[in-house]
Amino acid sequence: MSETPPNTLQHRFDGPDDAPVLVIGPSLGTTWHMWDRQMPELSKHWRVFRYDLPGHGGAPARPAASVTDLADRLLATLDSLGVQRFGYAGCSIGAAVGADLALRHPHRVASLALVASSPRFGTADEFRQRGVVVRTNGLEPIARTSPERWFTPGFAAAQPAIVEWAVQMVRTTDPGCYISFCEALAAFDIRAQLPRIGVPTLVLVGAEDKVTGPAEARTLVAGIPDARLALVPGASHLAPVEQPGAVTDLLLMHFSSSWQDTLASFPVPPAPAAPFTPVTPVAEIAPAALPDSVPAGRNERYDLGMKVRREVLGDAHVDAATAASDDFTDDFQDLVTRYAWGEIWSREGLDRRSRSCVALTAVVCSGHLESLGRHVRAALRNGLTPAEIKEVLLQTAVYCGVPAADSAFAVAQSVIREETTPPA
């Protein structure tokens, strides 16, 4: 394991020094050890480069602002080691990094494998609320529920030691970094860009994955021109851990057959006696759903305002507001988006935490408690803790009056309980 200068990633190599490099990326909440059972075979043919996410596996806790930021750190690490062209396999957020690299640096990526992946991971609201839960309660609630997200019930019951190992990986993760990656996944959306991924791609998914399942995998295959689907029976989200033999065989076959420009430099591994054949969907694959187009005449201020509005208030609220709009209220919604969100909330003079403090105070002072709940939710997403929201409301009791603050505390208490209560 090497030292990790700023803007690079903790990493290790396995395999011959003169072999082509295969980069392997982990899932959120795991370490490079999630790929341990693939190493004996993969390292026979490639120089396998594994990395840890910041704050994971003892790596320095340097939060990344986005998937692109994380991909840039990975490239900086590879550049420092003299690695120019490589194959890439990643799971979940590790797959998102690979897709980002294939889009922005296609000359660097020889071949791609996306495991348990999606062009958009759930909804932005889901990941931002997960960040709120971690900020309030720490990682224990996430660790406790990880086995049901990562493994099939049968595997979890039969392999308690592996389940405990997985839980410990989450418990030892830096909470601040975990929250930053929740934000990164909330903002990740490459549905419209899939046709630009030009490298041979294997999309591998556990047949029982409830996090990024076969539907998401088929969206990737439908959008990427040179993509094949591999469905792994008896596997959930962490298929490399749950079905290591099947995943290893599929990776061997994919990288051996598709990495044409480097194939001659290493021997092709023999085909396994009973290979797992990639499953082709019987039904026609529907095209990936693309984001709604921006109406004609909307300027950049509107686009920026809509982006900030969704990040602060959440997709559910914004979708409801826009769906309820009609000819009578459409101009008002346009004004709010352009002016409040595209102009004021987007200014650099205050960060979003500070703006939430101001918004909470102003709403309490004006008596518009019907809108306080959404601003409490926004404050939590913007990084305020329940304790800090309490301090803001105590301050309003002095300057806005005790009755106003009393009503505000009741609203905020209900919202905070709803937003910060860990999943059962």
Image (spheres, helix red, strand yellow):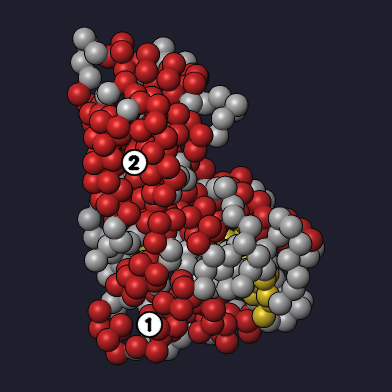
Residue nearest the observer in this picture, 362 or 89: 362
Which label is found at residue 377? 2
Name the residue beneath numbered marker 1.
Answer: 163
The residue that appears at 24% across and 41% down in the rendered structure is 410
Residue 213 in sight from this viewpoint: no
Do residues under tags 2 and 1 come within 8 Å of each other at their CB atoms? no
What number is the disc on residue 127? none
> What kind of residue is marked 2?
Arg
Local packing at callout 2 (Cα closer than 10 Å; few below 14, some 14-19, many 20+) is many
Image coords of residue 17 (percent x, y): 76, 78
Q: Type of residue at label 1?
A: Val
Q: Quadrant of residue 10?
A: bottom right
Where residue 224 appears, as percent x and y from the top left, is 45, 49
Q: Element under label 2? A: helix
Q: In the rendered image of this protein, does residue 292 appear above or below residue 128?
A: above
Helix, strand or loop under label 1: helix
- On the rendered image, what quadrant is the C terminus found in? bottom left
Please provide percent x and percent y for residue 151: 33, 75
Q: Quadrant of the N terminus?
A: bottom right
Q: Is residue 276 above or below residue 424?
A: below
Out of 195 and 146, give the one closest to the viewer.
146
